[in-house]
């Protein structure tokens, strides 16, 4: 019988999920295999066997975190009909509603840590995470724009601004916990996005 080695074992999947939950609570920047293994009911030797080394495990957890990020973005995807694009204002409103929810703050703190670490350690295991997440978000925001907007320089600038508002608001919320103030600022920007969509070209 041929064994498919590209499919992770059930134990590897189980430990990855446990390591991901641990990272959500404790972060990844100072991850150490011994306390992680003790917390998730494994051993450093088993983790090294399954993931290669600490960097391999970190990469796996980062990929798992990115999968959750992409799941967030799916909340604003259109039905696939380019004529049914929901527009940037609606996309930002839906995304912010998800980002501002208290139950998602652990995931978003991990995202912020990983984003920042990717910038200061571009050649390490974190390298490319920040750039990849920008591409992911811009792609989804582009899909929310009408076809005549998404392929124009103005459309590119407007979705870049929308992403900047969301990212800045998220960092402010994580730093201060002031949901009402930050949400009011996002809603102010939504009005500007709606005005921009209706403005003559």
Image (cartoon, helix red, strand yellow):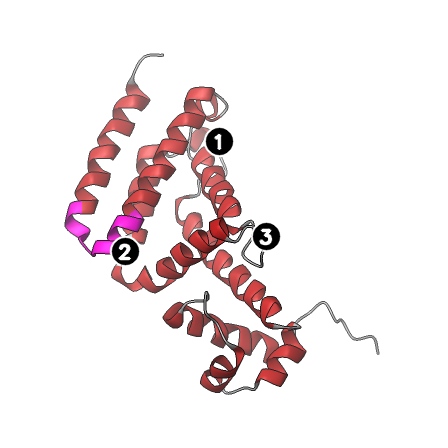
Q: Residue 47 vs residue 28: left or right? A: right
Q: Residues within 10 Å of mark 2 (few under 14, many from 20)?
A: some
Taking the spot 50% from the left edge, 76% from the top edge, the residue there is 32
Residue 171, placed above or below residue 87: below
Question: Which residue was labeled with disc 2?
Answer: 174
Give whichever of 23, 34 is nearer the camera: 34
Label 2: state its secondary structure. Answer: helix
Q: Position of residue 176 (x, y in %)?
A: 21, 55
Label 1: state its secondary structure. Answer: helix
Q: Which residue lies furthest to the front in this view?
A: 120
**Spatial CA span between label 2 and label 1:** 34 Å
Any part of residue 9 in sight:
no
Question: Which residue was labeled with disc 3?
Answer: 123
Q: How crowded is mark 1: few (under 14 residues within 10 Å), some or many (20 or more)?
A: few
Disc assigned to residue 82: 1
Which range of residues does the magenta coloring cover?
A: 170-181
Residue 182, placed above or below residue 84: below
**Spatial CA span between label 2 and label 3:** 27 Å
């Amino acid at each position: 019988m041929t064994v498919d080695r590209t499919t992770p074992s059930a134990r590897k999947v189980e430990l990855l999920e446990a390591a991901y939950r641990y990272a959500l609570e404790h972060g990844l920047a100072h991850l150490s295999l011994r306390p992680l293994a003790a917390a998730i009911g494994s051993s450093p030797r088993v983790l090294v066997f399954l993931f290669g080394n600490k960097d391999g495990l970190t990469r796996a957890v980062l990929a798992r975190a990115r999968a959750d990020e992409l799941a967030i973005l799916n909340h604003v995807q259109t039905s696939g009909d380019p004529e049914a694009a929901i527009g940037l204002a609606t996309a930002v409103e839906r995304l912010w509603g998800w980002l501002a929810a208290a139950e998602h703050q652990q995931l978003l703190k991990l995202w912020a840590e990983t984003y920042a670490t990717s910038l200061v350690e571009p050649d390490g295991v974190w390298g490319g995470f920040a750039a990849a997440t920008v591409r992911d978000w811009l792609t989804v925001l582009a899909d929310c724009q009408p076809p005549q907007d998404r392929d124009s320089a103005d459309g590119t600038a407007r979705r870049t601004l929308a992403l900047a508002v969301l990212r800045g608001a998220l960092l402010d919320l994580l730093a201060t916990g002031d949901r009402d103030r930050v949400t009011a600022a996002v809603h102010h920007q939504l009005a500007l996005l709606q005005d921009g969509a209706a403005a003559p070209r």
